[in-house]
Image: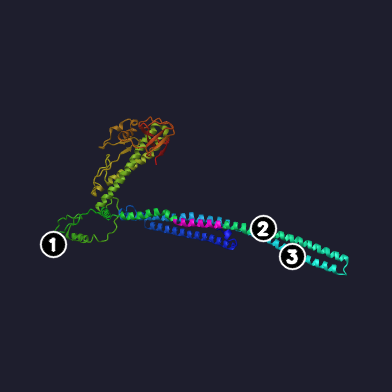
């Protein structure tokens, strides 16, 4: 069944129905837009909430940051932030796949509907025009036929009139004949117009309008089908992100299960243990026998008299519950209890040793680069490194001075404990190895032997010692996996020890990146290794 057959006479109904369908699409698009605004506002509020309570704003050194309950809370905030991102994704996909798509489709079917209605109106106007022509020919035929009848009656009357002349009778007959001929022409014209109108009317009701109505029916069905797809997308858009939302919720659950109250208690102990001994029992002060000046074994101090002793212990009874003012932070962490002070000093000591090792490595790299420049002037000016070498030497001396203050006297390759802050805090003489390698004013290497004495090897030919450490590394270390490849842009002879020659276009495996000294360690397929100038190759590291 179709509209053209069943609703051939319901043009107004069809026009109204199709218009109502378009309005429904517009209403649904508006509904989805408001839904996306709700999702966006919801996501924004969730992000602001996560940001408001995110503990990352505080320092990572805060004691609470190591507690599992705080870490889990951070995980929950992160998961909520990801959850908000999925709500934003829902809003974005609904806007793109439903609102924008349906709005574009709506404009297209509006134009199509307008075109079909114009076809119907054009056909109707054509039929109305034909009907007007029919009506006009009909009225003319009626008028001329009456005139012909009157002319015929007048001719008959004139012919019977005895007083009428022959000329009058002849004239009346001719007039009647002419009127009859005109009426006959009008009759034929009316018949032709009637036949034309009936043909167009038949075309209008059985072909033109059914075709237009069927086109409107097809348009309306496509509109309904498109709208149904929009309804389905409304659900599928959210279903698509449900697995990720589920993972966010699982992450929140996991954050709850990761809380370990026992470990948190241990962390609190580790972070806040003072290292003080509990106070010993107070001795009886017998004033009748004189002042007892016996020393106390308390680690809190030795009072010099009974009044002082009573005063110190009277205040000590309330030490656990009294409010203490915030201590002034000092460089030696003397404001902290012994246990915490020891930990902070050891932490600071490790940081200084790492910085010192970095500066020593930089110093070695600059020394190697200077030696290479001296042997190969075309690669660079050795004098250009003087300022960097000097700055690195100053940094090394500064860091050694800081080590002296904390624990270490770097007179050997080992960081040895001394009577310094860490020793005062009861720290262990943990040793952190680092290379001590400095430069004299001329940029030559000064190597120290383990006993602090200058090694005789430093008097050897500098040209032989430049890459001595490179060779040692190759002998002592196992072959490391390549971290990338490089292609030679220029020829390099590799005449110095520790280097390797290469030809333009040769591909080598990268074993060690440039550490700032201008050299990259590479390996051939046959196992030969050595250093090449970084500027001579293009490097592609593995991802």
Does residue 118 show up? no
What is the number of the mark on residue 142?
Answer: 3
What are the residue bounds of the magenta stretch?
217-235
Frontmost residue, 242 versus 120: 120
Q: Position of residue 517 (x, y in %)?
A: 38, 38
Residue at the spot 78% in from the left edge and 66% down from the top edge: 149
Q: CA distance from mark 3 to mark 2?
A: 22 Å
Magenta stretch holds residue 338: no
Q: Position of residue 364 (x, y in %)?
A: 34, 37
Dot placed on the residue nearer the N-terminal end, 1 or 3? 3
Mark 1 Cα within 10 Å, few/some/many (few <14, many 20+)? few
User: In the drawing, does residue 299 fall left or right of residue 442?
Assistant: left
Image quarter for residue 436?
Answer: top left
* The N terminus sits in image quarter: bottom right
What is the number of the mark on residue 199?
Answer: 2
Prevailing secondary structure of the magenta residues: helix
In contact (CB < 8 Å): disc 3 and disc 2: no
Disc 1 versus disc 2: nearer the observer:
2
């Amino acid at each position: 069944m179709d509209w053209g057959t069943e609703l051939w006479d319901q043009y107004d109904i069809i026009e109204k129905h199709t218009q109502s369908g378009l309005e429904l699409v517009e209403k649904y698009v508006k509904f989805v837009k408001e839904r996306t605004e709700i999702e966006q506002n919801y996501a924004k509020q969730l992000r602001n909430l996560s940001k408001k309570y995110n503990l990352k704003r505080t320092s990572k050194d805060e004691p609470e940051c190591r507690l599992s309950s705080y870490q889990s809370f951070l995980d929950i905030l992160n998961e909520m932030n990801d959850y908000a991102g999925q709500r934003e994704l829902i809003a974005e996909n609904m806007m793109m796949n439903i609102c924008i798509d349906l709005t574009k489709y709506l404009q297209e079917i509006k134009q199509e509907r307008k075109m079909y209605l114009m076809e119907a109106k054009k056909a109707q106007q054509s039929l109305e025009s034909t009907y007007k022509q029919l009506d006009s020919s009909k009225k003319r035929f009626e008028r001329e036929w009456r005139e012909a009848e009157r002319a015929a009656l007048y001719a008959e009357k004139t012919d019977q009139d005895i007083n009428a002349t022959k000329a009058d009778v002849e004239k009346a007959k001719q007039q009647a004949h002419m009127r009859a001929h005109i009426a006959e022409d009008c009759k034929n014209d009316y018949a032709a117009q009637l036949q034309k109108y009936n043909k167009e009317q038949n075309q209008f009701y059985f072909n033109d309008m059914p075709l237009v109505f069927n086109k409107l029916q097809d348009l309306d069905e496509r509109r309904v089908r498109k709208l149904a797809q929009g309804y389905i997308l409304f659900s599928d858009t959210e279903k698509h992100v449900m697995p990720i939302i589920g993972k966010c919720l699982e992450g929140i659950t996991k954050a709850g299960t990761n809380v370990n109250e026992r470990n948190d208690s241990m962390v609190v102990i580790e972070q806040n243990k003072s290292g003080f001994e509990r106070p010993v029992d107070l001795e009886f002060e017998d004033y009748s026998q004189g002042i007892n000046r016996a020393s106390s074994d308390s680690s809190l101090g030795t009072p010099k008299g009974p009044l002082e002793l009573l005063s110190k212990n009277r205040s000590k009874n309330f030490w656990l519950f009294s409010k203490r003012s915030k201590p002034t932070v000092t460089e030696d962490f003397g404001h902290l209890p012994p246990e915490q002070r020891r930990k902070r000093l050891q932490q600071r000591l490790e940081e200084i040793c790492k910085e010192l090792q970095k500066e020593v490595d930089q110093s070695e790299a600059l020394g190697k680069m200077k030696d290479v420049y001296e042997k190969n002037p075309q690669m660079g000016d050795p004098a250009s490194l003087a300022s960097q070498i000097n700055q690195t030497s100053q940094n090394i001396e500064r860091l050694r001075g800081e080590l002296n203050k904390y624990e270490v006297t770097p007179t050997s390759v080992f960081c040895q404990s001394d009577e310094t802050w860490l020793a005062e805090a009861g720290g262990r003489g943990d040793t952190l190895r680092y290379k001590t390698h400095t430069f004299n004013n001329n940029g030559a290497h000064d190597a120290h032997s383990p006993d602090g004495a200058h090694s005789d090897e430093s008097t050897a030919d500098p040209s032989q010692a430049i890459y001595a450490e490179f060779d040692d590394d190759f002998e002592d270390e196992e072959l490391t996996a390549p971290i990338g490849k490089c292609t030679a842009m220029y020829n390099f002879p590799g005449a110095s020890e520790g280097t390797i020659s290469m030809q333009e276009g040769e591909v080598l495996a990268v074993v060690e990146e440039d550490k700032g000294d201008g050299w990259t360690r590479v390996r051939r397929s046959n196992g030969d290794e050595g250093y090449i100038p970084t500027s001579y190759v293009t490097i592609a590291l593995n991802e």
